[in-house]
Image (cartoon, coloured by chain):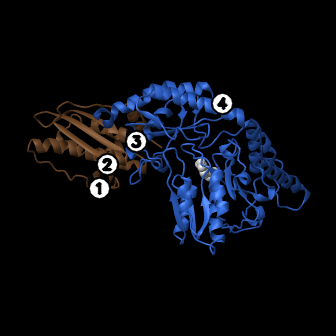
Amino acid sequence: MKVVYLDNNATTAIAPEVFEAMTPYLTAQYANPSSQYSFAHSVREAVETSRESIATSLKIKSSELIFTGSGTESANLAIKGVAYAYRSRGNHIITSEIEHPCVLESCKALEKEGFEVTYLPVNKEGEISIEALKSAITDKTILISIMFANNEIGAIQPIKKIGDIAREHKILFHVDAVQSVGKMPVFPKELNVDLLGFAAHKFYGPKGIGGLYIRNGVRLEKYISGGHQERNRRPGTESAANVVGMAKALELCINTMVEEGEKERELRDYLETELTKRIPECFINAKNSNRIPGTSSITFKYVEGESILLSLDMYGICVSSGSACSAGDLAASHVILGIGVPIEEAQGTIRFGVGKYNTREDIDKVIEVMPKAIEKLRMMSPLYNVK
Amino acid sequence: MYSEKVIDHFQNPRNVGIIENPDGYGKIGNPSCGDIMEIYLRINGSHIIEDAKFRTFGCASAIATSSIATELIKGKDIHEALKVTNKVVIESLDGLPPKKVHCSIMAEEAIQAAILDYATKNSIKVNVETCHSHTCGGCCSK
Ligand SMILES: Cc1ncc(COP(=O)(O)O)c(C=O)c1O
């Protein structure tokens, strides 16, 4: 059965060009980039050329970019690193309710250590309120951490406005841009962003590598002990293959960003138009917000997400559901609840992530299969017939 | 993550639907905890379950456990049917992932609730400890 992969927000396929660029560093050029002999020089050079290339794409200096092991690690390092380094200045952090767990859990961990965190709510389009942000700021606030685009609903936050406010109050601003880098122009300096994290596997690069922009002058306390790699901020031998792969992947995305965005938006809109036409009582989340082009979150009333997901899986269609459905867990996604969807409806939410390798045939397959799948589950649901 | 049996019962659920004027009816769970299970029973004068139907809102394993539960109790006398515990349900499905064990408990409780409803209406004494275990996180009793 042909796999119809529509979960590109979870991860993406590695681009063939990326794989090709990485191969020499997985084979012949295996030296440790920090070694002194000539055999290692080409590996160091590959790492630094890649750093330069990524930095240019983000319009930052290469000295402001370090490599990490994932988007999760970038967020942990940024948030905890700033919190520990600036503890003497204050203990207050502002974030939003719909952040990725790597941000939320970093904040929760800091709360246990005496930090105070404000979790800003969002409106039904998934956007924070600038007024609420302003009034949350205190003289103890050291960090604002707000995501660029949300991984479940695609909503893009007003990053420039937030950056201006942060700068005006001399508060550091971290942005989780894992769902944005590679998909839209991201220039941290123009947005007054001080720290910004991303991950290669979301834009057709390898898994196991992330990047973190740290504006020159920002102090960061490293929490992994070890050697002096990555400007003494992230010890551990760099994976040259992954670094080269990330740079190549970003280069490819930057070159085709506008056309790709258009194509994905078209496929996404086609999917949404046809599904909402064919399936009664479903709605698109954060529909009127400025969304990243490939992301679509749709809530189907009277049915539960995992059973929708598995019904589609039977046809080789890969999507994701925000719901957890396990004993003791809240079964619904904090993002979908955060935008005000009632809990009993929130559980029937499916996320589609359209990517560059998707075709119209992929979408046609979903349009063909999904109305039947939803109807079958609804016929089983006591909530449906009650109406 | 799921056994073939679970997938089979999820894809081809047995006994979906309702029974008009059932002799026994049980409903467990609520929408905010993510599962609702309803069981309808047709029971004859010798207390034999002649027909069982279900409707479930929930994940794949909630649907599969309801389906197998109705199969297991059909044709049984109500006292025998009460021996269909969550363990029996799990074994009949060739296992459930640990996180989904609560679904089998809901199935057991739905059977109990439906039989208890019948027993109460017909003044029959049955041995039921309702919602005995609460490994469902207490969610089912909300
Ligand atoms: C918005 C966002 N932040 C952070 C992450 C974590 O990235 P990684 O999986 O590379 O750790 C993800 C990926 O799921 C994400 O979508």
In the picture of the structure, the residue carrying the numbered disc 3 is A345
Same chain shared by disc 4 and disc 3: yes
Kindly identify the residue that appears in the image at 74 percent across and 42 percent down.
Answer: A249
In terms of depth relative to the viewer, which is nearer, A107 or A313? A107
* Coordinates of residue A278 in the picture (x, y in percent): 45, 25
The type of residue carrying mark 2 is Ile
In terms of depth relative to the viewer, which is nearer, B91 or A272? A272
Q: Neighbour class for label 2 at 10 Å: few (<14), some, many (≥20)?
A: many
Same chain shared by disc 4 and disc 1: no
* Coordinates of residue A314 in the picture (x, y in percent): 49, 31
In the picture of the structure, the residue carrying the numbered disc 4 is A263
Label number found at residue A125: none
In terms of depth relative to the viewer, which is nearer, A207 or A92? A92
Q: Numbered disc 2: what chain? A: B
| Relative vertical location of residue B49 with respect to residue A140 in this rendering, above or below | above
- Dot placed on the residue nearer the N-terminal end, 4 or 3: 4
Q: How far is disc 2 from disc 3 in space, using C-alphas?
A: 24 Å
SS label for mark 4? helix
The type of residue carrying mark 4 is Lys
Same chain shared by disc 1 and disc 3: no
* Coordinates of residue A149 in the picture (x, y in percent): 60, 46
Kindly identify the residue that appears in the image at 79 percent across and 42 percent down.
Answer: A21
In the picture of the structure, the residue carrying the numbered disc 2 is B105
In the picture of the structure, the residue carrying the numbered disc 1 is B133
The type of residue carrying mark 1 is Ser
Q: Neighbour class for label 1 at 10 Å: few (<14), some, many (≥20)?
A: few
SS label for mark 2? helix
Left of A105 or right of it: where is A264?
A: right
Tell me what hue chain A is rendered in. Answer: blue
Q: How far is disc 4 from disc 2 in space, using C-alphas?
A: 47 Å
